[in-house]
Amino acid sequence: MDAVVLEENGSPRLVDRPRPEPGPGEVLVRIDRVGVDGTDREVVAGAHGEVAGSMVLGHEAVGSVADPNGTAFEPGETVVPTVRRPPGDYNEYFRRGEPDMAPMDATVECGIDGADGFMAEYVAVPSEFLLRLPERLAPAGFLVEPLSITAKALELVAASREPFTWERERALVLGTGSLGLLTVPVLEDRFEEVYCLGRRDRDDPAVELAREAGATYVDSRETAVDEIPDAHAPMDLVVEATGHAPHAVGAAAALAPNGVAALLGVPGDHEASVELGELHRELVVGNRALIGSVNAGYSHFERAVEWLDALPPSIVDAFTEHVYPMDRFEAALDSDVIKTAVEPHP
Ligand code: NAP
Ligand code: BGC
Ligand code: ZN
């Protein structure tokens, strides 16, 4: 079968690999679509660690059950795999059903670090790491994984604001990439005003989509993140989805008192001079919080399926417009359009 692999010190290649034989408790899944995000590009650039031997790329997948192999799944059911697997034996995080809370050295991530991903015609997946979704959502099912990232982050945010009356008026998303743009419509349903900051012209399709989803666009070349409270209003929530390290500090500065910023980007090293006293003081005297969040648990995937179902069709269309046959994976990886995906069986 065909698979897109990244090899040690190499570029991604389409190769022939044996079709996997599902082991006990594993389901054979025929992969229909695999989404591409900023992380995939970071993986190819070597930012998520060295590849030992070769690794199949891709972590945002949707497929259908080719062989249930004695599990509770039915042939043909539409499924989405989760991303994290135990690194060998099950550890406490996997035993508790909280793999998303495992430190990076207590997990591997399919298609990112330490385990094969899903950019292949077939994959074998332990049934506990598979989620069913309605067949009508299959064409956009590769959006469940990135939506699960937002679902987890918003759950952590809500828990941190739960003890008091949190005024949820304004939210700001940093980034017009695939994660940021998917987060805008989710926040639009939950906040009175949503802002989205990027560095592209107003007629760029990504910016147009942010506005169509209901956000007020802020061009960071005109208004820096920390200028947003004066230029617009202080924010009750900021979701950082750029991986641009100064945005962590900028996010804190954009917050209203009692506000919270969820940091999702995974930056490389970045040295900068920062007025730490102000940052520290404003976090404390304003009851503000900074939260980091990575990956997502099974319940977040389930919530993401509901959110996907609730997305306006025009938004879903924009996210599913650029699907390439898998032998054109390079076009999908190199693109800077809103979202791309590959299809192993076009
Ligand atoms: P993406 O599609 O590549 O989007 C990245 C966004 O950040 C784009 O809007 C990009 O602007 C902007 N950006 C990049 N560098 C910037 C800079 N130096 N200054 C200002 N803006 C900058 O990536 P994505 O898939 O949305 O992911 C965004 C980040 O979240 C990545 O770091 C990714 O690794 C991380 N991520 C984390 C999780 C998690 O579990 N925490 C899950 C998914 C993704 P342009 O497009 O205009 O260049
Ligand atoms: C993936 C997550 C993963 C994170 C860090 C994201 O792009 O969607 O599942 O945990 O990258 O590697
Ligand atoms: Zn991702």
Image: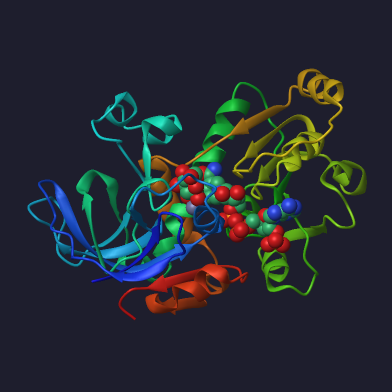
Give the answer, above or below, for where 223 lies relative to 35: above
Give the answer, above or below, for where 205 lies relative to 50: below
Q: Is residue 292 left or right of residue 232?
A: left
Question: In the image, what residue occupies the spot 88% across and 52% down?
Answer: 223
Residue 215, x across and y down, in percent? 73, 59
The single residue placed furthest to the right in the displayed view is 230
Give the answer, above or below, for where 285 lies relative to 289: above
Check the image and tell me how it is coloured: rainbow
Of 192 and 238, nearer the camera is 238
- Please state the total of marks drawn on the protein image: 0
Of 262 and 325, nearer the camera is 325
Q: Is residue 311 left or right of residue 117?
A: right
Name which quarter of the figure residue 138 lies in: bottom left
Question: In the image, what residue occupies the spot 87% across and 27% down?
Answer: 275
| Residue 175 seen in the current view | no
Image quadrant holding the N terminus, namely bottom left
Image quadrant holding the C terminus, namely bottom left
Of 242 and 289, nearer the camera is 242
Name which quarter of the figure residue 102 lies in: top left
Residue 208, x across and y down, in percent? 71, 70
Name which quarter of the figure residue 21 lies in: bottom left
| Residue 144 seen in the current view | yes
Residue 36, x across and y down, in percent? 49, 63
The single residue placed furthest to the left in the displayed view is 70
Question: In the image, what residue occupies the spot 31% across and 66% down?
Answer: 120
Residue 271, x across and y down, in percent? 76, 36
Question: In the image, what residue occupies the spot 50% across and 58% down?
Answer: 44
Q: Is residue 193 left or right of residue 178?
A: right
